Image (tube, helix red, strand yellow):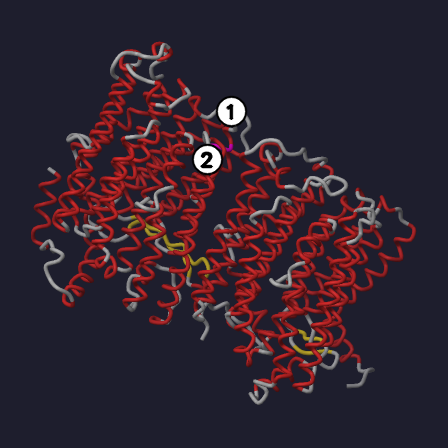
């Protein structure tokens, strides 16, 4: 393919255009920020929001296209489009929630927004990776800005602690992942995802020790990023210390990107050796659900509680992976609902927060329903969705994952997960208790002067209801997306129990 | 398809709830809540009027695709089993709102009415769903408003009670969800069709082991809701600490969702296992009857007396259901309605007393007959109906249940009769201590009698008690075709079972004897 062939250039560049837009926006914001004062970063935020929106529109344009680009480094399929769209939504919500927050907390806007954009770029790269090296590149492009973002409030000790902790453990886990990639390369002789799949499908490698060790290390590497027990130790401290919009971005964006790569590598390319890793994930899923839910019960800080809740939800997603390939669409659907629900919940936390990271104890939510009925109502929707109460997105997601797992015979895993859901109901409902049945708490400041935040919460609440009440189209897109990654072209219905 | 009558019935309260959110003036809130509870009430009476009593199958059916990937449809309909429970729901919600507007609920009336109407949507949806997914969704939805009603407007350890209520019920219902999913998957395996539609799922062939586990999961969820002994412990707390309207709906309607679940789902889905489980459930029912009555007797708090009496009365309902013959089940449904009306009435009356005295301790009262004669008279009628006095609603249900239970398992019924005697004992003794004797506390001399609004709340209930006591036929004749059709499956399963087992352990009522018995009982 000649580099001067215009048609070829078009084909190669169009699919990565959204990523290019995000990258250029990141640089522009960084440069423009030289002349802008820390307290007046709102303009930069709006530019960031607009560029993410443009990238979103261009990503819509590649839905349904199929192929590989850059000699197999980039996969063009609905799977990457699906994840890129949700990642961009997460980034846009994060920006909307940051506009006033960044200015109030004197966070340097240029650095903040451009790091956010770079991180989103890394996430998108992970979602569309076609070989293991690009996954690693994406992971680093995503993680390094987030390390910095976590420590963005320089004068706050907790924020500094979060950054250091996240950086050290993150770097450590990246090492595991890279080592795993190297061993898989050693076993299969290729880093490209398609050829790896073909090499494994032939069956001759199924008990190759290099491959097994490599897969094991990669599980650890991804396990860190999705915050699976026992690789979750960093999560609560980092979630608590980081600026809250960054926490939201980590809880949703990082998890989305990590799961995108995790799913693509394991559920598609390692699917023929599923017997080896599914058992491991079975155990990890049970530990993650149970650990997350049980520890969440005793939390008093809402950010820590949501951190453990995020761990528990990673457990439900891992349950889907442990149950095998057919749960793929369910995992994608679950992630979609999870994204909106969690973004909304963190949005409410931001609304309550005051300068210097106070106001995020669960006791601060007391009496919120009487003072801010709409805000409390939105939070109630998010919490009920997280607890899995119909007809909200969280419930339908659980329903989808559980039914696919049951279909594949994982009855006990599902029963453990449902008992976990009961445990989780306790701590989610306890926030409802604080909001509706107790008095005290803190006043919410200046909600009316923060339209972007209010809009983000409102949109998230609307999406949480919509995706739950009318799930059919989202299930279909999730199924299409997942099947397109496994190389099956064309339109798929989200058939519940495909043969 | 029938112009969406049942859809309107289910979702009118939801529309009302959203409408109320936009109101700010207190009078307007109560008025619009009352009007929005009258609309479904009127619709439900229209459904009763149009209902074809001869038809055993669902009527007013609506079905639309909802989640095609799983074959989930919005499928609703009404039959003889759910018809009167729907009426009970609309009646009790309306009366509760009417009562609560009269000073019982003073804080946050807007949210109160909002949750009451959402609750009505959840309850009606649960009763009318034919699709299991839809049923499960409504089943969970009704939990949330009740949680708020207890937690916000309750008394005493209200938060503890609310959380306990939610966790108990959720534990059961999540396991039921697993069972539903498993059942649907088996339907897919056998019919190559994914569907949550109840009529299809009735036909899924299951191995005995599968059926036993699935029945256990369904039965646990429903038994918690009923509540059967020994999973009843959430009930006294929830009842005692709930606001009056919450107790009325909880006892009056919500507990019936458990017994309704047995009739609609657990038994017809797994008839073979249900037949096997007759001795177990009859034993638990009898334990519940006697335990509930004994514990009710020693309660110092009026509301706790009625709460434990619910455990006892619902034991009767379970006894009738697991008689698995038309008489027993007709009686059980009748008792469900009767208990809803009389216990609802008792909770309302206790609420009225509490509003005046801010206590429910029995020892605080005595001699009320002299100071509030109208109250005492109404209390007596309602209490007698709860006791099962002939001529009032409670008698018909209990009598039919005893009849059905006796045919099925004599020993259980013999013990259950003891429950009737104990029931009379604790209710009369409670009445005596509250109403008769000298006035021991000076405050009791000056409390005011019922207001016009309170009488207006109680009169419809008393009218229903009398009507149901004297004219059971119009109700039973509408239930009967559906009950018989449901039992056709259970008896079919039993016939199979008895081929394999020792005969004579379970007596079968020959079909020819059914009709005269019913007719005799109804007369």
Circle count: 2
Q: Magenta stretch: dominant SS?
A: helix
Relative to A325, A63 lies left or right: right
The disc numbered 2 marks a residue on which chain?
B
Whether pointer 1 and pointer 2 mark residues with C-beta atoms closer than 8 Å, the reply is no
Q: Residue furthest front?
A: B298
Q: Does any portion of residue A89 appear in the rendered image?
A: no
Q: Could you classify mark 2 by the number of other residues whose Cα lies within 10 Å: few (under 14), some (14-19), or many (20 or more)? A: many
Query: Would residue A370 be found to the left or right of residue B364 on screen?
Result: right
Element on which disc 1 rests: helix
Split into 4 quadrants, where in the image is the C terminus of chain A? bottom left
Mark 1 Cα-neighbour bin, 10 Å: few <14, some 14–19, many ≥20: few
Mark found first going from the N terminus, 1 or 2: 1
Residue B161 seen in render: yes
For mark 1, name the chain: B
Name the secondary structure under disc 2. helix
Q: Does mark 2 fall on the same chain as mark 1?
A: yes
Q: Position of residue B33 (x, y in %)?
A: 45, 31
- The stretch drawn in magenta includes residue A477: no
**Image quarter for residue A443?**
top right
Which residue is more in the foreground, A115 or B36?
Answer: A115
Q: CA distance from mark 1 to mark 2?
A: 18 Å
The relative height of residue B63 versus residue B152 in the rendered view (above or below) is: below
Residue B119, position in %: x, y?
A: 42, 40
What residue do we see at 30% from left, 12% from top? B439
Front label number (1 vs 2): 2
Q: Position of residue A198 (x, y in %)?
A: 61, 85
Tell me the number on the disc at residue B26. Answer: 1
Q: Which residues are magenta?
A: B111-115
User: Mark 2 — residue?
Assistant: B149
Residue B121 position by quadrant = top left
């Amino acid at each position: 393919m000649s580099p001067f062939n215009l048609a070829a250039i078009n084909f190669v560049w169009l699919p990565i255009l959204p990523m290019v837009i995000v990258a250029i926006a990141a640089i522009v914001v960084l440069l423009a920020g030289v002349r802008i004062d820390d307290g007046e970063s709102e303009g930069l935020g709006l530019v960031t929001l607009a560029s993410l929106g443009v990238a979103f529109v261009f990503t819509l344009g590649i839905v349904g296209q199929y192929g590989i680009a850059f000699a197999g480094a980039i996969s063009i399929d609905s799977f990457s489009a699906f994840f890129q769209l949700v990642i961009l939504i997460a980034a846009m919500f994060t920006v909307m929630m940051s506009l006033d927050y960044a200015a109030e907390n004197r966070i340097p806007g240029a650095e903040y927004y451009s790091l956010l954009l770079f991180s989103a770029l890394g996430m998108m790269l992970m979602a569309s990776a076609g070989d293991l090296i690009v996954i690693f590149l994406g992971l680093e492009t995503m993680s390094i800005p987030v390390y910095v973002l976590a420590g963005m409030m320089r004068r706050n000790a907790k924020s500094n602690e979060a950054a250091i902790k996240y950086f050290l453990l993150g770097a450590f886990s990246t090492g595991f992942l890279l080592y795993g990639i190297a061993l898989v390369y050693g076993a299969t002789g290729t880093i490209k995802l398609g050829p790896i799949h073909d090499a494994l499908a032939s069956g001759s490698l199924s008990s190759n020790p290099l491959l097994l060790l490599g897969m094991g290390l990669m599980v650890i590497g991804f396990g860190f990023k999705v915050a699976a027990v026992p690789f979750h130790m960093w999560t609560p401290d980092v979630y608590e210390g980081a600026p809250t919009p960054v926490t939201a971005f980590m809880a949703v964006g990082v998890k989305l990107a990590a799961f995108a790569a995790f799913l693509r590598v394991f559920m598609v390319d390692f699917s023929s050796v599923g017997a080896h890793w599914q058992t491991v994930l079975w155990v990890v899923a049970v530990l993650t659900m149970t650990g997350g839910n049980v520890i969440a019960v005793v939390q008093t800080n809402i950010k820590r509680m949501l951190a453990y809740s995020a761990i528990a939800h990673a457990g439900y997603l891992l349950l889907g992976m442990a149950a095998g390939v057919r749960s793929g669409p369910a995992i994608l659907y679950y992630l979609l609902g999870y994204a909106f629900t969690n973004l909304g919940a963190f949005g409410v936390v931001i609304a309550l927060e005051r300068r210097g990271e106070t106001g995020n104890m669960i006791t601060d939510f007391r009496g919120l329903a009487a003072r801010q009925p709409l805000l409390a109502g939105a939070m109630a929707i998010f919490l009920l969705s997280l607890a899995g109460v119909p007809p909200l997105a969280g419930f339908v997601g659980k329903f989808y994952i559980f039914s696919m797992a049951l279909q594949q015979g994982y009855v006990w895993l599902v029963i453990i997960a449902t008992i976990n859901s009961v445990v989780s109901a306790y701590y989610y409902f306890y926030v409802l208790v604080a909001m509706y049945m107790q008095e005290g708490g803190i006043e919410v400041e200046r909600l009316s002067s923060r339209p972007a935040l209010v809009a983000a919460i409102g949109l998230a609440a609307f999406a949480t209801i919509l995706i739950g009440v009318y799930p059919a189209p989202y299930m279909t897109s999730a199924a299409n997306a997942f099947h397109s990654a496994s190389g099956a072209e064309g339109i798929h219905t989200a058939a519940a129990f495909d043969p | 398809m029938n112009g969406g009558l049942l859809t309107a019935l289910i979702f009118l309260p939801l529309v009302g709830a959203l409408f109320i959110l936009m109101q700010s003036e207190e009078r307007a809130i109560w008025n619009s809540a009352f009007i929005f509870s009258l609309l479904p009430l009127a619709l439900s009476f229209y459904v009763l009027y149009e209902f074809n009593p001869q038809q055993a199958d669902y009527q007013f059916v609506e079905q639309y695709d909802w989640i095609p990937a799983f074959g989930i449809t919005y499928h609703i309909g009404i039959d003889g089993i759910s018809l009167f429970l729907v009426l009970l729901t609309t009646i009790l919600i309306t009366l509760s709102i009417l009562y609560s507007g009269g000073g019982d609920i003073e804080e946050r009336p807007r949210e109160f009415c909002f949750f009451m109407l959402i609750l009505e949507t959840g309850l009606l949806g649960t009763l009318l769903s034919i699709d299991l997914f839809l049923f499960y969704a409504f089943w969970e939805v009704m939990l949330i408003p009740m949680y708020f009603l207890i937690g916000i407007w309750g008394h005493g350890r209200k938060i503890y009670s609310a959380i306990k209520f939610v966790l108990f019920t959720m534990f059961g219902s999540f396991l039921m969800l697993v069972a539903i999913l498993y059942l649907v998957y088996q339907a897919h395996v056998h019919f190559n069709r994914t569907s949550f539609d109840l009529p299809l799922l009735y036909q899924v062939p299951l191995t005995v082991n599968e059926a036993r586990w699935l029945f256990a999961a369904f039965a646990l969820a429903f038994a918690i809701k009923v509540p059967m002994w020994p999973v009843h412990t959430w009930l006294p707390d929830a009842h005692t600490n709930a606001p009056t309207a919450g107790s009325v709906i909880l006892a009056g309607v919500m507990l019936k969702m458990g017994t309704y679940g047995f009739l609609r789902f657990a038994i017809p889905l797994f008839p073979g296992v249900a037949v096997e489980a007759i001795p177990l459930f009859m034993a638990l029912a009898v334990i519940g009857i006697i335990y509930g009555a004994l514990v009710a007797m020693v309660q110092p708090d009026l509301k706790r007396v009625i709460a434990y009496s619910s455990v006892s009365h619902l034991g009767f309902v379970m006894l009738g259901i697991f008689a698995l013959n038309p008489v027993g089940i007709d009686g059980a449904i009748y008792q469900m309605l009767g208990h809803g009306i009389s216990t609802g009435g008792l909770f309302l009356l206790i609420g009225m007393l509490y509003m005046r005295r801010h206590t429910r301790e029995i020892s605080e009262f005595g001699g009320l007959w002299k100071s509030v004669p109208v109250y005492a008279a109404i209390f007596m009628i309602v209490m007698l109906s709860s006791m099962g006095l002939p001529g009032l609603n409670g008698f018909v249900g209990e009598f039919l249940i005893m009849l059905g239970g006796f045919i099925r398992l004599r020993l259980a019924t013999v013990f259950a009769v003891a429950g009737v005697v104990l029931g009379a004992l604790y209710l009369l003794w409670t009445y005596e201590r509250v109403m008769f004797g000298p006035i021991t506390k000076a405050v009791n001399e000056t409390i005011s009698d019922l207001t016009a609004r309170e009488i207006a709340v109680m009169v419809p209930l008393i009218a229903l008690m009398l009507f149901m006591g004297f004219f059971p036929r119009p109700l039973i004749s509408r239930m009967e075709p559906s009950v018989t059709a449901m039992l056709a499956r259970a008896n079919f399963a039993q016939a199979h079972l008895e081929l394999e087992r020792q005969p004579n352990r379970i007596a079968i009522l020959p079909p020819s004897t059914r009709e005269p018995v019913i007719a005799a009982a109804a007369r």
